[in-house]
Amino acid sequence: MSGTSEALKPPADAVEPVRHPEAPAPGELLGAHYEHCFGCGEGQRHGLHLQARAGDGLSVTAEFTVQAAHQGAPGLAHGGILTTALDETLGSLNWLLRVIAVTGRLETDFVRPVPVDTVLHLDAEITAVHGRKIYSRATGRIGGPDGPVAVRAEALFIEVKVDHFIENGRPAEIEAAMADPDQVRRARAFEVNP
């Protein structure tokens, strides 16, 4: 990363993270954390529909195909869409720790343009944990998983409890989510973290 801010550098006493014993197995599709999430949910018509898979250690991989609805300039992906793809991939790392966490800070470098109809191959990894802070990084490549880097990011996620969403979300969506047994099951799995 060029010019990474101090906020994204783990402190000296940060610990090396450990994969949760009940984390999804390498290669396992993680699924959407919320049906209406713009990044991963199938309930968003123009969403990214990003699908992440658990990788080895504390890593995930994902793919995202840039659609015409994701343009920022003629024939090219919007930078905010690419940042969303990175953020969603980084957020998927939380499945490996079995915690609920939200983005605290995200810094993105745009290395090269990403044309419409291009598949962006994403990979992310957790680098350190310090209390509720989770440090991570991701890259997005074009032309294949080993292709040239188009975008990269470093991030800081903050662990929260389900109450964070209940207290801050719009009531109609919170009530609908609480009425969905699958959504409640996913949330409860993360709330019980040894």
Image (cartoon, helix red, strand yellow):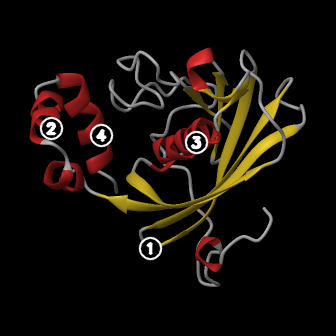
Instruction: Give yes or no for contact between labels 3 and 2 (Cβ–Cβ under 8 Å).
Output: no
Q: Amino acid at mark 3?
A: Gly
Upstream in sequence: badge 3 or badge 1: 3
Spatial CA span between label 4 and label 1 = 20 Å
Circle 2: is it few (<14), some (14-19), or many (20+) Cα within 10 Å?
A: some
Q: Position of residue 123 (x, y in %)?
A: 70, 39
Q: Amino acid at mark 2?
A: Ile
Spatial CA span between label 3 and label 1 = 29 Å
Lateral position of residue 177 relative to residue 81, left or right = left
Which residue matches tag 1? Answer: 131
Upstream in sequence: badge 4 or badge 1: 1
Camera-nearest label, 4 or 3: 3
60 or 148: nearer the eye? Answer: 148
Q: Which mark is residue 174?
A: 2
Camera-nearest label, 1 or 2: 2
Q: Amino acid at mark 4?
A: Ala
Q: Amino acid at mark 1?
A: Gly
Upstream in sequence: badge 4 or badge 2: 2
Please, what secondary structure does the residue beneath circle 2 have?
helix
Upstream in sequence: badge 3 or badge 2: 3
Camera-nearest label, 4 or 1: 1
Upstream in sequence: badge 4 or badge 3: 3
Residue at left offset 38%, top offset 20%: 44
Which residue matches tag 3? Answer: 80
Q: Position of residue 70 (x, y in %)?
A: 59, 25
Residue at left offset 24%, top offset 29%: 183
Q: Which mark is residue 189?
A: 4
173 or 184: nearer the eye? Answer: 173
